[in-house]
Image: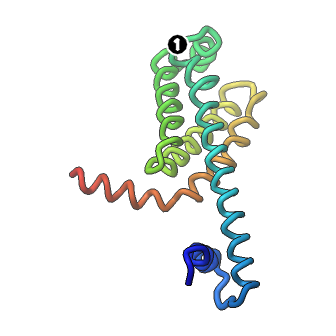
Amino acid sequence: MSETTAPAATAASATGTTGVTGTGGTALAESATVGGRRARIALRALQALLALFFAVPSALPKLIAHSSAAETFDEMGWGSTGMYAIGVLELAGAIGLLIPVLQSAAATGLAALMVGAFVVQVTMLDGQYAATPLILLVPLALIAWTRRSHNTDLLRLLRRQS
């Protein structure tokens, strides 16, 4: 087996195309490798875009106590403590989306935060922006599921530290 067909065979077994032989099997495996590479790049770009969203237009106004964020949290009765806490959680999640070992955990945490944001939008606020957390929940769930193998790496690191 040459160096050019070894990754293709690995990709074929990873995608579940077993028992394929000959040049047609290699072409199929190579196309799966290219498709897999494109999917990884697209997922990484999505993670970067979400990290940018959660860091700048979402967490930053809360962390600098912008009047729009402060008024909303005062209206809910959470005050500056709740505003800063949510801002820190969003910023931590944004940073975690960019660190490979934390990607799944960060996406899961942000998804949980979006569920809470939806509930708050519907129950405490007028519900005008209730769809936004639900829309963000979909790509966060995709990232959490796709990057779930990083959870074992994270657990291994945490066990090594204790």
For the point 57% across and 28% down, the residue is 55
Kind of residue at badge 1:
Ile
For the point 51% across and 28% down, the residue is 86
Identify the image quadrant of residue 127: top right
Q: Is residue 105 above or below residue 13?
A: above
| Horizontal side, residue 120 vs residue 85: left or right | right
Front residue of 6/63: it is 6
- Image location of residue 54, percent across then percent down: 60, 31
- Image location of residue 99, percent across then percent down: 47, 43
Q: Is residue 15 above or below residue 136?
A: below
| Horizontal side, residue 157 vs residue 105: left or right | left
Q: Residue furthest top?
A: 67
Q: Provide the residue designation for mark 1.
A: 64
Badge count? 1
Mark 1 crowdedness (10 Å alpha carbons): few <14, some 14-19, many ≥20? few
- Image location of residue 158, percent across then percent down: 30, 52
